[in-house]
Every structure is written in C-alpha cells, then in structure tokens.
C-alpha cells in the first residue's frame, strides 16, 4: 500500500478544525494541572496530597467512563467534547475567583479534581471515537500520529508556559486556561461529520459491550493492559514538584520544563512515526519501547542533575508514544463505528487508571519509601511487566503488521 500523502490529511477540514480544538484544550489542561499541583504543594507540602489529586480525578472517571462511552455512540461526539471543554472553563473560572478571593484551599482543589475527572470521563471516549469519522481509513494511522504530535506539542508548551506564568501568580495561569478552554469548545461546535447514532437501548449489556469486545480480542487486551501497568508503575508525574523543589533544587519554571520533557520526546517520536510508520514487527517493538520507558524512569529516579533528568524524561515520552500510536491505531481499525464510543471508553479507563491512579500510587509509595525509592522501584516494575507480557500475550508479541 503506498504511503498516504500528508497533504491529503491537511485538506480534511473537519479533522483539522477538531485537531486545533484538541490542541487548545490539551494546552489549557496542562497549564491548569501544573498550576494546580504547585498550588497544592504550596498549601500542604505533602506528597500524599499530590497523590490524592490524581486519585480524586481517577475515581469519578472510573465510575462514569462506561456510561460516557455509550453516550458517545448515541449523541453527537463533537458536542460532547465541546461540553467537556466548557465545563473545564468553568473550573478555571472558579479557580480564578478562589485564588483572588483567598478561598483556594486543599479541600477545594480536591473537589475540583473530581469535576475534572468527570469531564475527562466524557471527553476521552468522544474524542477518540470521533477521529475515524473525520478521515478516510487509509489516512487513519497518519491522522492519529498527527493528533499525537499536536497533543504532545501542547503538552510541551502548556506546562512550560504554565510554569512561566505561575511566576506572576496562579491567577494568571487559571485565566489563560479559561480562554483556551473557551476557544476549544467553540471550535468543536463547528465540526461536522455524518453522525449515525446507535439504536441500542441503554442497559448494562450494551454499556459493558466494549469490555466484551476487548476481552475477546487478546491482542487488544494485551496492548491496552500493557499501557495500564507500564504507566501505573513507571509514571512519576505526581512527584515532579518534589523533584523540582527538594531534589533538583529548582522552582516552578523548572517544574514546567520537567512536565514538558516527556511530551517533547513523544512529539519527536510522533513526527518520526508520521514519516516512517511502523510496518513490521509491531509487537516486539512495542514491548521493547515499554522496557526502554522503564529503564529511563530508573535513570530519572536516581538523577540529581537537572539536565540528565530532562533527558531521561524525554526518552520516557518517546518510548511511550510508540505504545500510544500503536494501541490507538489497532483499536480504531478493528472496531466498528457503532461501538467505537464504548470501546474507546474501555481504552480511556486503562489510560485513566495508568495516569490518575498512577499518580496516587506514586504519592503513596513516596510517602512510605521516599520519592527516589518510589520512582526507581516503579521503573524496574515496568521492565518486568514488558518481560511478562512477552509470555502472557504471545499474539501481541508476534504481531508483525498493523493491519
């Protein structure tokens, strides 16, 4: 099959409009989260509370994602995404008022984390299921790679800009996030696609159908669960404020750079995958990338030099991006459109568990063993997971081609 020309992809106007909306939304969210983490650590100086921010986002997402996936198969996915952007704009506005009014407390930040978790529950299935409706299938892998590159660029710029703006105060960051969320929601309202709602009645069987679909396809189960356990064990995002202030002895600007570093690696890798998509030995390359992710996490955990820490995080982002692009392409190609919302919801649960629950795991283990012990043990665990999946999911390990 000839390589699709990128000019074809850029000519897909609904996709490009949605791409811009996602970039704006991700940048706003990243700015918001870096300010929220630093704000919480300023208030409490507690690794446990940093972990709770992740846990309070994960629990509502876990409870709401499956119903959200069913909703994404019945309603206009673009409008669901827009509603999530406007909800997060409301959160940013509340944070502006709370910071200015002096009532930005630990309890308020935890309550806001719950709202952000609910927004994520509805946002993720809608945005994942929408992309295949906006491009021809021959352009899907390139579209996912381009989407990933845009998201990672936003993840690079968002934390770095958030850390820089935080020097002027948390209110500046929250107000900037508010403007970007409003832009993202408005752009998405103008996305048009042929919407074919599912006619199935809402019941437990239809809501849980996505789990059945993934469970019956061991390759998809192996790929999504691999990402779950790798990032759950190897993620160190929640501990970055501790590393920035107490280990690397830097400030909020450096924290923004640390948060942006994995995204820089992911952006570079997504550009490579756009030009040279993975075509052979998909499974072995996926497992090798997860092992590299774990090893780089160990290096970060042991480092006391800011430059080496940045480099290690860049490598974790590059390795993780291989997993992201491979997993999303496989899921979307092998899922019929009328089920994409529910299957994307299952994928969102795995992603949410690996990110938000991983933040709680990092905070809890750091409170017990210290931040260095938490990160190093998690990185070693990730390498062991990659080795175990080689035996547990041979279909995934032997997968040669994407299609």
Image (cartoon, rainbow, N blue to C red):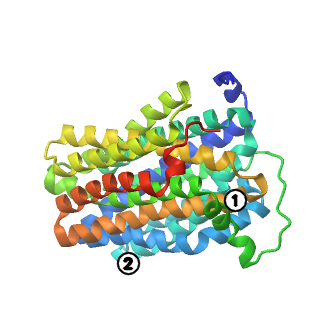
Secondary structure state at the residue bearing disc 1: helix
Residue at horizontal 22 percent and vertical 67 percent from the top? 366
Q: Is label 1 or label 2 in front? A: 1
**In the image, is residue 350 above or below residue 310?**
below
Residue at horizontal 63 percent and vertical 51 percent from the top? 128
- Front residue of 113/106: it is 113
Residue at horizontal 76 percent and vertical 78 percent from the top? 203
Look at the image and tell me in which quarter the N terminus lies. Answer: top right
- Front residue of 292/139: it is 292
Of the numbered discs in the image, which one, if any, rests on residue 341? 1
User: Residue 248: image x %, image y %?
Assistant: 15, 49
- CA gap between label 1 and label 2 equals 33 Å
Of the numbered discs in the image, which one, if any, rests on residue 107? 2
Crowd band around label 2 with a 10 angstrom C-alpha radius: few (<14), some (14–19), many (20+):
few
User: Residue 132: image x %, image y %?
Assistant: 71, 44
Look at the image and tell me in which quarter the C terminus lies. Answer: top right
User: Residue 320: image x %, image y %?
Assistant: 42, 45
Secondary structure state at the residue bearing disc 2: helix
Residue at horizontal 66 percent and vertical 67 percent from the top? 212
The mark nearer the N terminus, 1 or 2, is: 2
**In the displayed structure, does residue 141 sit left or right of residue 313?**
right
């Amino acid at each position: 099959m000839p390589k699709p020309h990128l000019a074809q992809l850029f000519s897909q106007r609904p996709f490009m409009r949605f791409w811009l909306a996602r970039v704006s939304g991700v940048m706003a969210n990243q700015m918001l989260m870096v300010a929220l983490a630093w704000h919480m650590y300023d208030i409490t100086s507690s690794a446990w509370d940093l972990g709770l921010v992740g846990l309070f986002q994960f629990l509502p997402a876990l409870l709401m994602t499956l119903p959200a996936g069913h909703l994404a198969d019945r309603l206009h996915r673009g409008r669901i995404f827009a509603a999530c952007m406007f909800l997060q704009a409301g959160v940013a506005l509340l944070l502006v008022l709370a910071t200015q009014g002096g009532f930005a407390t630990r309890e308020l930040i935890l309550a806001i984390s719950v709202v952000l978790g609910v927004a994520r529950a509805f946002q993720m299935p809608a945005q994942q299921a929408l992309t295949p409706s906006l491009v021809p299938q021959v352009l899907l892998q390139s579209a996912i790679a381009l989407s990933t590159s845009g998201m990672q660029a936003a993840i690079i710029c968002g934390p770095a800009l958030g850390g820089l703006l935080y020097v002027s105060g948390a209110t500046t960051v929250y107000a900037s996030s508010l403007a970007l969320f409003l832009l993202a929601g408005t752009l998405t309202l103008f996305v048009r696609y042929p919407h074919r709602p599912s006619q199935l009645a809402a019941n437990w069987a239809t809501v849980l159908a996505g789990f059945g679909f993934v469970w019956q396809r061991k390759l998809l189960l192996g790929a999504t669960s691999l990402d779950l356990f790798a990032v759950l064990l190897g993620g160190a995002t929640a501990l970055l404020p501790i590393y920035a202030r107490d280990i690397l002895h830097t400030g909020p600007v450096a924290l923004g750079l640390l948060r942006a570093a994995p995204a820089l690696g992911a952006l570079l890798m997504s550009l490579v995958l756009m030009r040279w998509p993975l075509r052979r030995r998909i499974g072995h390359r996926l497992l090798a990338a997860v092992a590299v992710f774990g090893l780089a996490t160990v290096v970060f955990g042991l480092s006391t030099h800011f430059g080496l820490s940045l480099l290690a995080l860049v490598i974790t982002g590059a390795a993780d991006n291989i997993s992201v692009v491979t997993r999303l392409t496989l899921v979307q190609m092998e899922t019929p459109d009328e089920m994409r919302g529910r299957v994307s919801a299952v994928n969102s649960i795995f992603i949410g568990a690996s990110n938000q629950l991983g933040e709680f795991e990092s905070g809890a283990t750091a409170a017990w063993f210290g931040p260095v012990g938490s990160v190093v043990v998690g990185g070693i665990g990730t390498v062991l997971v990659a080795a175990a999946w080689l035996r547990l999911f041979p279909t995934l390990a032997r997968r040669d081609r994407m299609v």
